[in-house]
Amino acid sequence: TGTADADLVEALEAGRQRLDSAHEREVMARVTAARWLVPVVAVATETDSAGSSGSAGSGAAGLTTGTRSDMAAVTLTAPDGSRALPIFTCLEALARWDATARPVPVTAAAAAQSAISEACDVLVVDVGSAHATALRPSMLWALAQDRAWVPSHDDAHVAAAVTSAVREEDLVVAHRLEAGEPAGAGVLRIVLTLEPGLDAETVSAVATRVGERLATDGETRARIDSLTFALETAP
């Protein structure tokens, strides 16, 4: 019928007040199960310019008309250069955004895979609405890979990757994973407990090496939206 999943919209609206990971899991579970509408628009691929002499029957001078067009998915580009694929919960929301766009119904996984193929960083739900929501890169990749999304600080794969990255550092006594700030931004905070008496340069080098090891693993990168370190000194 083109209508929205009421429970999904309610969860998206609640996300304005609740930024905890438990609510994000609930939203993602509903996002995964929902039917989505991806907008496509006509794009001219061949054009014809009317004559500019102004002679009778030539039409308006300098007027360019489309002689052939294809349908293309729409992408959005932010001022910082990041790209997003807009998706909509219902026909009404899509028409409010662009009444000329044609709706294509897709699964969440198909929408995410399309976003990745278009070099998009995020999915944006119901652009221009009161509950407009950006699904972060970790969420996008989870949908595309058809796996359940979990916050990075609770992700077993991430935990194992961090343990492996830290294992090579003799100066690290212990570590733990926490949700970083701001809430709702997907920040992973790695707390490193270090040997006492280290200078700032040595501490910085340890954190840098750990971060670089994590960055070389594509699967781990896909599960972490942002990374920060906190440092403690062992007693």
Image (spheres, grey):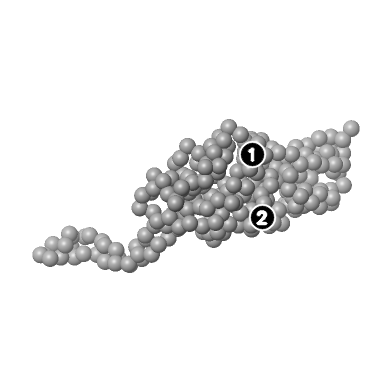
Q: Secondary structure at mark 1?
A: helix
Residue that badge 1 annotates: 23
In the displayed image of the protein, which residue is found farthest to the left? 56
Q: Which residue is mark 2?
A: 147
For marks 1 and 2, the one nearer the N-term is 1
Between 131 and 138, the residue placed more toward the observer is 131
The image position of residue 155, as x and y in percent, is: 73, 48
* Residue placed most toward the observer, 80 or 99: 99
> What's the residue type where badge 1 is placed?
His
User: Gap between marks 1 and 2, in whole Å?
Assistant: 18 Å
> Which residue: 40% across, 56% down?
102
- Looking at the rendered structure, the secondary structure element under dot 2 is loop
Report which quarter residue 203 is drawn in.
top right
Count residues near mark 2 (Cα–Cα under 10 Å), then give few for <14, some for 14-19, many for 20+.
few
Left or right relative to 151: residue 173: right
Seen from the viewer's position, the closer of residues 117 and 143 is 143
Q: Can residue 168 be spotted in the picture?
A: yes
**Residue at the limit of the structure toward the front, as seen here:** 1
Q: On residue 160, which mark appears? A: none
Q: In the rendered structure, which amino acid carries the disc numbered 2?
A: Arg
Note whether 229 is above or below 65 in the view shown. above
Residue 60 percent coordinates (x, y): 17, 59
Residue pictured at 69% horizontal, 56% vertical: 219
Q: Is residue 126 left or right of residue 185?
A: left
